[in-house]
Image (tube, rainbow, N blue to C red):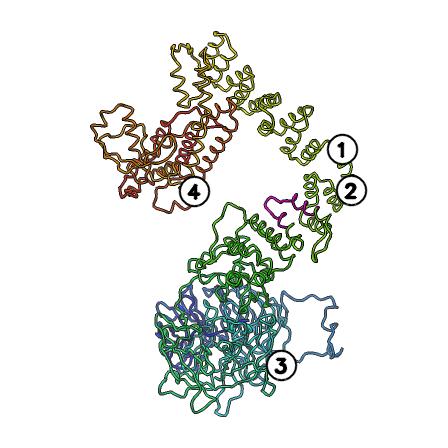
Amino acid sequence: MRNLKLLKSLRSSELQGPGSPQYLSVRADTGTLLVLSQYSITEFDPRTGQVVNEASLTADGFLPDDGCGVVVGLQDLAELESACLATAGGDVILFNLNTCQVECVGSVDSGLTSMSWSPDEELVVLTTGQETIIMMTKDFEPIIEFGIHQDDFGEGKFITVGWGKKETQFHGSEGKQAAQRKLQVQPAAAWDDHRPRVTWRGDGQLFAVSAVCPQTGGRKVRVWNREGVLQATSEPISGLEQALCWKPSGSLIASSQRHPNKHSVVFMEKNGLLHGDFTLPFSKDQAKVKDLLWNSDSTVLAVWLEDMTPGEDGQVNTYVQLWTVGNYHWYLKQSLDFGKDPQKAPVCVGWDPERPLRLHMVTRGWTTITYDWGWNTDRSPGVDDTDNANVAVIDGDKVLMTTFRKCVVPPPMCSFELQLKSPVNQVTFLCRPQKTNQLAALTADRQISVYGKDSREDVDKTADGFRVISPHCLITVLPTHVPRVAALQDDPLVLRQLLWLEDELFVGVSSGLLPTSSTLVMLRPAQDADDTLSVRSAFKVDGVVVSMVQSLIISEGKHFSSPCVCLFTSVLLQLASNVSSFAVCNDFLLITTHSHTCRCLHLSSLSVKGLQVALASDGNQNDETLRRVERGSRIVTVVPQDTRVILQVSLTHERLFHVKLIKLREFVLTLVVLICFREAFECMRKLRINLNLICDHNPKVFLDNIETFITQLNSINDVNLFLTELKEEDTTSTMYPHPESSPIQPQPASGQKKVDVVCDALRGAMESMDPNKFCLSILTAHVKKTVPELEIALQKVHELRGERISTPGAVSAEEALKYLLFLVNVNDLYEHSLGTYDFDLVLMVAEKSQKDPKEYLPFLNMLKSLEPNYQRYTIDKHLKRYKKALHHLSKCGEQHFPEALQLVKEQKLYSEALRMFSANSSHYKALSCAYAEHLVQQQQAEQAGLLLWRCGEPVSALQAFASSTSWRNAICVAQQIPLPPDQLALLARDLLNSDLGFCFQQDCEEAILALITGAVWEEALRLVSKQSSAVLLVFSLYKCLRQPCNIMFICQYVAVTLSPQTHHNIIYRIIYRIYLGYIVKPPSCPTDEDGPDCPDAELYSEASSVMTNSKYSQSNSRISSRSSKNRRKAERKKLSLKEGSPMEDRALMYALGEIKDVHSLLKALVLFEFDKQAEKLQLAYEDALQMMAAAVPEVWPEGLQNNQAPLTGPNSTANSIMASFQQQQKPVVSQQGRQRSVLNQPFSSCYIDHFCCLNSPDDDDNNMSLLSVSKCFSLQMLRS
């Protein structure tokens, strides 16, 4: 549904020469024209108006001097850089375009009647005066010569078996006599020159020759291959004329035929049979077809015609018509009437070989004309709902109108036709609000006919209520003011662009005085004639105007006073090369691409780079901005204030689909500003937009108006539909992203799950409004949650069973259960009902399922006969809920303990089982021994030894400690057994490969107390076991473990220090300093006592992680005189945790070293049966590990490699870190303004030594201290 629109025309009169032009050829490499006359050959550049080369053909005698010579062919040879021409006298001449030399390369005595080169310029076909064909190579070496007229049909002769003969076919109303009637072939027309016409197929494999048959006197077409073998001969065609042109795509051969009642262009296949035609808009004897010309991409057929009968002045009109085909219908898109002036009539017409829509002409007066055409869809420009989305298609003297708001009609059909008196060249719609359905058509006789919709009955209607408002004759009445327009007023398409701005104001574009300029003219009704439009004003525009729209006039930086037109010149920036069509609708740009996709892009946030990125990406499956379309689809129009987009596919029928994003902006505004949930919901259902967008685009507004949402929907089915489509995905960031300029942006993710929050909010609102009415929706809210609450939903259904239905709209238990079975698989629902331990509910669900009663009734009867706790145990075990099963089995008594122990071993529920029994019971001891056996199998012998030791199994504990090389614990247990001294010494040698000697001093109580104070629990316990009177020491150890400052200090420190809200995030800041590349020295290294003081430093308290401010202003001599203890205390005061302080790095490392050894403390707590305190400490320890893992993306954010910071992080290597720091030797300024030097060498072992010097706990693979974990965490970041 596209029209041919004239983008620009170039007219040049600088070319002059003797005689008249006879042939035209276009040079593909330079774009210049080769014009041949009976005197000379000229190479002319129409863009500059200069003659490039010229050579005389009469000087050397190739053509006679009197001008009676005839040229029969001209061809540009790009490879030889020459032009080849043939004369009627038989000479074949080469004109060298570089040296301007003319050379005769061969001659035929009988003369030549035509010359045609193959498309690959490898072969040339010459027809001679003796009715023969000579085929030669590009070097003019003869290949073969044969006669044109041959009796044989050719290699493609048809094979018939009788029933396929024409005589046996049905002839309709003509009867059987038609089968016997012989076709009378009319001889060639009187104006036919009787010369053969040669045309090649686009691939150069076949060529066709049209020649006058000596027997019938009519023309016949024969097809040969490039070896000179006849392939086919056309059937007898009466009235066939001389024009012949093979479609470059190779499907059809075009010619013209004169029928008794019409004149048409006919098409033949390569086998010579006719295949379609179209009728020319002339009477039978009105015009003759001089030539037919296909453009290079086979989309446009040019028909060059001339009147057969001269007018009163003895002159004839000349026409050039451009035809296109769609859905087997031929459209006349442009008709150029050159008038009766013989000097303005074209004598040479040809398409450009490189630009498919560029047409060249040379007139008899040596004027060259170049037309550049383009495809354009003429659609109404309205943006409100009064616009009918009109699309106008030009078809000769008719305009085919289709109103896509009301119907979708495939071409060539239409909603209605507008019949005019002359062929239409342009159509335009009125650019006024509420009036965009009015149409104006510019015809070839320079009249503008205006059409508008009118419902009155007394008007002259043409079709469907349309009437002709006024036909205006387009002439120029002010030649003194605008002479250049007056000079062009008789030329075809004097106005190549036309825009209808107001009721009586048209804006047109014509060619300027220079090839690179245009003239903008304003047309209004003349003051002395209402039916005449005159040029009221004209403006010169630098650049060639190729399009106009209603906006500001902007052309290469120049603005005009009229604020209603925007000009687009041909000098534009190419944004994309794979776009096949586009259209603008509201704030969106719709684009179809050659990769068979349709894109919908926000104009408010669209940039040139963004457009190129969008067109280059394939999009994911949830990308709603992209839609796959059929091959060759193009946008016809978009219905204003709607989501309908009409596409035309390659077979020229329409496809209608809805673009969701066009409606999203309107939907969001309606939803946010007006809280119109019902309208938005209906729109989303119609366009199949994901309903999650209702709550995703602004969750706070939705949750605050949850009751309004339910009230406006007022439909149980709609609420259920909304609930069933809920998912965790945020559609505002994936499927329907907000534009960057939108005030509503995606909300940050919270800790709660979206589905759970929305379901709970809707369920709470519905339960408060009317639980009976919204019973099904409440059940849906329970089922749709992340962890479906099927037990609660089943319980609600069970409660309905005993209620009477008294409220209108309430549902029964059967209906609710049936609905629940629709949402949940019946087997899952049966198992969940069994998990409620309510057998009535189980039977109710089982009755609605497809289960056989023989399957479930015996099982249910067996369960009813069991003791309640054992019954629940059996149900939970059947449902594989082993933790609940163990809980119920533990209440069943002593006789079921072996079964419980077996369940614990099978499902590895040791931790849960230990919580269910008293620590002093025999069951607890049996479970501990079983747990220890499991730990030994899991290569955790040390933990197994602790469990065996605490439950009174020292021998087994000794074996476990010995296998885990835990020598301290092994010696303690061995002394507790006790082992003889010799065996104890042997055990020590086996564990440590040395004789300890056990030579301890007499007074080691002070050492034991120091170890207890330092939280070195294992070594303290070992020394205690050596003492014979260790009761007091064991009590001190026991008391020290129970103190909150030792047990809860780590928990409190981890919670405060590693909290994301605290200002002093120690681990985070240490990692961040490593990332910055600061030089960090161990805090154990002595500092410069003569250094500057640190006033207002924040001090770290070892007891409680509380920061206090203090003044430090003592002299250096006084510090040196203190004791070593006071000196260390003074050094620690220098270590300030305040950000930007000089020793912040050392303070951070010192604070990290203050974290106690979690591993050894946990083992001691478990040994002395402080299980609850150990569990709480373990949970705090896990939170610390998670906090350090969460700090990784904050310290090394995504895309850090593009920044100027040192290249460190999880994805770095040693070489990349070294290269990064070598390239960035710049000082880093702290928050206090002090400069610090960046590390001048790559990361080395100084960091590893720094972490190791803080503490040296005994670590294993399963339970490390917090310091060890932080050390490994940091080292892993460095090594990765």
Kindly check if marks 4 and 1 are in contact, taking CB atoms under 8 A apart as contact: no
Please state which amino acid type lies under the numbered disc 1.
Ser
Please state which amino acid type lies under the numbered disc 4.
Pro
Please state which amino acid type lies under the numbered disc 2.
Asp
Q: Quadrant of the C terminus?
A: top left
Q: CA distance from mark 4 to mark 1?
A: 58 Å
Kindly check if marks 1 and 3 are in contact, taking CB atoms under 8 A apart as contact: no
Q: CA distance from mark 4 to mark 3?
A: 83 Å
Q: Nearer the viewer, residue 245 or 877?
A: 877
The magenta-colored residue range is 780-798
Q: What is the crowding at mark 2: few (fewer than 14 residues within 10 Å), some, or many (at least 20)? A: few
Q: Nearer the viewer, residue 553 or 563?
A: 563
Q: CA distance from mark 2 to mark 1?
A: 21 Å
Above or below, 602 against 487 in this view is above
Q: Which residue is mark 4?
A: 1193
Q: Is residue 8 left or right of residue 328?
A: left
Number of numbered labels in the structure image: 4
Estimate the x, y position of residue 1225 in percent, counting from the top left.
28, 41
**Occupied quadrant, residue 62:** bottom left
Give the mark nearest the N terminus, 2 or 3: 3
Give the mark nearest the N terminus, 4 or 2: 2
